[in-house]
Amino acid sequence: MKIGILTGGGDCPGLNAVIRAVTVRAIKQYGDEVVGIRNGWRGLVDDEMAPLGYEDVAGVIDLGGTILGTSRTNPIGDSGMMTKIEETIRGAGLDGVIAVGGDDTLGVCLGLHREGYPTVGVPKTIDNDLRGTDYTFGFQTAVTIATEAADRLRTTAASHHRFMVLEVMGRHAGWIALESGMAAGADLILVPEFPFDLDEVCATLKSCHDRKGHAVLVVAEGAHERDATPNLITQHKELDAFGNVMLGGAGPLLANRIAEQTGIQTRATVLGYVQRGGPPVAFDRVLGTRFGVAAIDAVHRGGFGKMVALRGETIGLTPLEEAVAGFKLVDRDTWKAAEALFG
Ligand code: F6P
């Protein structure tokens, strides 16, 4: 078989582990020909592909980002793009397309499957907000980076008797904030799923300050007040090809309001793209490798229209319909367990 692989959406640590596993498994187990599709779905629209062999994936497992490049190109609903995709897949004689991405990329994967194309999805996002899989690769690396940042902020908070606010990513779900905040022993964590009341936030922080002279607050970029409209803090108003706004700025805004309301020095740090870059932790390398192997096996077993997934310790297949039907959000029980230690 001839199989193409692409990486779409935000980059994240572990993508190259997937590309490596797909390539090596395909050649060693099945004698397949593998091509790397450049820059997400854009590569199929522009017919930008190149062969992938052992030498192309040697030494990339610990490399951040994606050697194929990525984009947020959305061909669904664009007849011109869809025609070009048809021509590229037919012209190249692709028997399968493996799409590594988050909800947007996998939504296109499903759309193309419904049009009759042989697509298989691999779940990728630092946000860990995809349904149908216990974890996505990239998430543990982001949590590790954010935890170290929060640990470092706590020492400066204690030294200056300040409040330190760390803003982390997570477009729709607060998983990064929740797990890095818990791991760092943050005094307060704010996530989109459970909108906050500013007076309550300030009261909790003041209580910490009275007791130990400082506090650390981890806030997800999508966190917002209960009755705020608009409730998201955005960098600008432009939308990407999937209609996503660019979030960012909740941390600094919140820090200013906390300082005003409590009279205590408050500083914000926006972790931004640092939590998405650089080498993957071992968990994400292993999960990416397991996903890559399973994706090639799925192509050979006709598992089209599905996404490889981690369920407990087992790698299986989840229908793409389930994966893109909504987001995996922080549930109340998990939230309550974290909230028990706030303040
Ligand atoms: O979806 C992953 C993610 O990193 C989100 O956490 C973040 O809000 C978004 O991508 C940023 O998008 P971009 O890389 O296009 O700025």
Image (cartoon, rainbow, N blue to C red):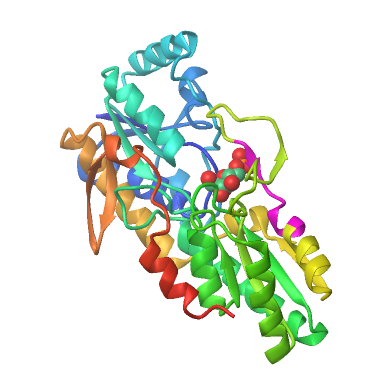
Span colored in magenta:
245-253
Is the residue 78 above or below the residue 16 in the image? above
| 250 falls in the magenta region | yes
At x 32%, y 41%, the residue is 323
* Residue 252 placement (x, y as % from top left): 76, 58
* Residue 321 placement (x, y as % from top left): 28, 34
Is the residue 317 above or below the residue 302 in the image? below
At x 44%, y 67%, the residue is 335
Give the total number of marks visible in the rendering: 0
Q: Is residue 64 left or right of residue 246?
A: left
Is the residue 2 above or below the residue 129 in the image? above
Q: Quadrant of residue 337?
A: bottom left
Q: Is residue 227 visible?
A: yes
Q: Nearer the viewer, residue 268 or 257?
A: 257
Q: Nearer the viewer, residue 226 or 249?
A: 226
* Residue 286 placement (x, y as % from top left): 36, 61
Quarter of the rendered image showing ligand 1? top right
Instruction: Find the residue positioned furthest to the left.
Output: 301
The quarter in which the N terminus is drawn is: top left
Q: Quadrant of residue 137?
A: bottom left
| 191 falls in the magenta region | no
